Image: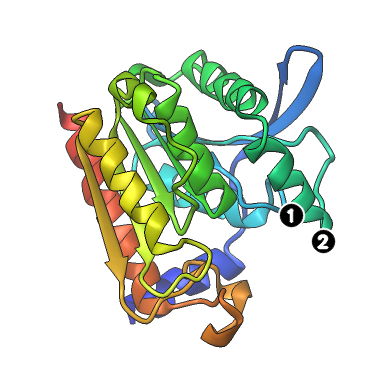
């Protein structure tokens, strides 16, 4: 029943937040801000989108976080109005994965925007992300950003550099589909080595029978395609994130 409620909320809920324009240099970006009903200073969660750009999926996740009492800001990596489809999604995601300086600049712009948002406790910020966005959440932590935590849902976890590992200040939570064909075992081993080298506070949870995109209903249910929804992994990963946020914000 809880799983059905969660999936239904993501698929059909009305959006309650607002669009926010901000900039990275001269590039205009369009994020989505959702706040709790209570007029209080609260911790904030930054959300990084999947490879198609900021859409209703991330906005609904932001609304869910706002209902939990957090200020949630879904950021825009690609630019206002830039929402690739089809094969273009891979090209856009690859552009930023291949240019870590640019990727980090866009991530930092989002972090700066949420940090100056009224009602945000600037000392209590975490970042989460889905697929490409999971890679982004980890990239922001790897940049040495002053954040409490970073959570990756079915994201790529490669690209880390051992020499940069000591710069990581955030606690890390990786929520991974055990059968995800896009994250090879070698990448996981390298991630472990990176985290150990930096003495990072981290956890990696693997969900059995889950592949890539396991939190996205729109991915369908055919695991043989390599990307598919898994209701149990969706519910369990959200619960793991919830506990993680409570822990890092309590420090």
Q: Which residue is at a point 27% across and 42% down the rendered structure image?
A: 193
Q: Is residue 222 above or below residue 146?
A: below
Looking at the picture, how far across and down is residue 97, in whole percent? 63, 39
Graded by Cα atoms within 10 Å as few (under 14), some (14 to 19) or many (20 or more), the crowding at tag 1 reads: some
159 displayed left or right of 27:
left
Callout 1 touching callout 2 (CB < 8 Å): yes
Whether residue 42 is visible here, answered yes or no, is no
Read off the residue under disc 1. 90
Which of the pair 94/57 is nearer the observer? 94
Q: Which residue is at a point 32% across and 24% down the rendered structure image?
A: 168
Looking at the picture, how far across and down is residue 151, in whole percent? 37, 45
Query: How far apart, in angstroms, are the residues tagged by discs 1 and 2?
Result: 6 Å
Q: Which residue is at a point 42% across and 69% down the rendered structure image?
A: 6
Looking at the picture, how far across and down is residue 9, in whole percent? 50, 67
Q: Is residue 221 above or below residue 32?
A: below
Task: Identify the colour scheme used.
Answer: rainbow
Looking at the picture, how far across and down is residue 221, in whole percent? 55, 85
Read off the residue under disc 2. 87
Q: Which residue is at a point 16% across and 30% down the rendered structure image?
A: 250
Which of the pair 77/16 is nearer the observer? 77
Whether residue 215 is visible here, answered yes or no, is yes
User: What is the number of the mark on residue 64?
Assistant: none
Quadrant assignment for the C terminus: top left
Quadrant assignment for the N terminus: bottom left
- Secondary element type, mark 1: helix
Give residue 204's quadrant in the image: bottom left
């Amino acid at each position: 029943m809880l799983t059905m409620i969660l999936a239904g909320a993501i698929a059909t809920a009305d959006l309650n937040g607002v669009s926010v324009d901000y900039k990275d240099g001269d590039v205009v970006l369009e994020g989505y801000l959702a706040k709790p009903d209570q007029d209080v200073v609260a911790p904030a969660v930054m959300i990084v989108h999947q490879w198609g750009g900021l859409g209703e999926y991330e906005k609904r996740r932001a609304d869910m976080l706002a209902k939990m009492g957090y200020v949630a800001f879904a950021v825009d990596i690609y630019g206002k109005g830039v929402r690739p489809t089809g094969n273009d999604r891979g090209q856009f995601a690859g552009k930023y994965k291949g240019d870590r300086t640019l990727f980090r600049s866009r991530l930092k712009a989002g972090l700066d925007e949420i940090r100056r948002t009224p009602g945000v406790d600037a000392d209590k910020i975490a970042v989460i992300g889905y697929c490409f966005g999971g890679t982004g959440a980890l990239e922001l932590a790897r940049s040495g950003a002053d954040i409490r935590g970073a959570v990756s849902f079915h994201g790529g976890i490669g690209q880390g550099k051992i020499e940069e590992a000591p710069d990581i200040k955030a606690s890390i939570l990786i929520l991974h589909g055990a059968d995800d064909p896009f994250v090879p075992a070698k990448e996981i081993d390298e991630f472990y080595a990176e985290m150990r080298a930096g003495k990072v506070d981290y956890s990696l949870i693997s969900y059995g029978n889950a592949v890539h995109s396991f939190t996205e209903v729109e991915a369908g249910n055919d695991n043989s395609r390599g990307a598919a929804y898994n209701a149990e992994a969706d519910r369990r990963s959200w619960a793991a994130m919830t506990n993680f946020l409570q822990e890092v914000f309590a420090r």
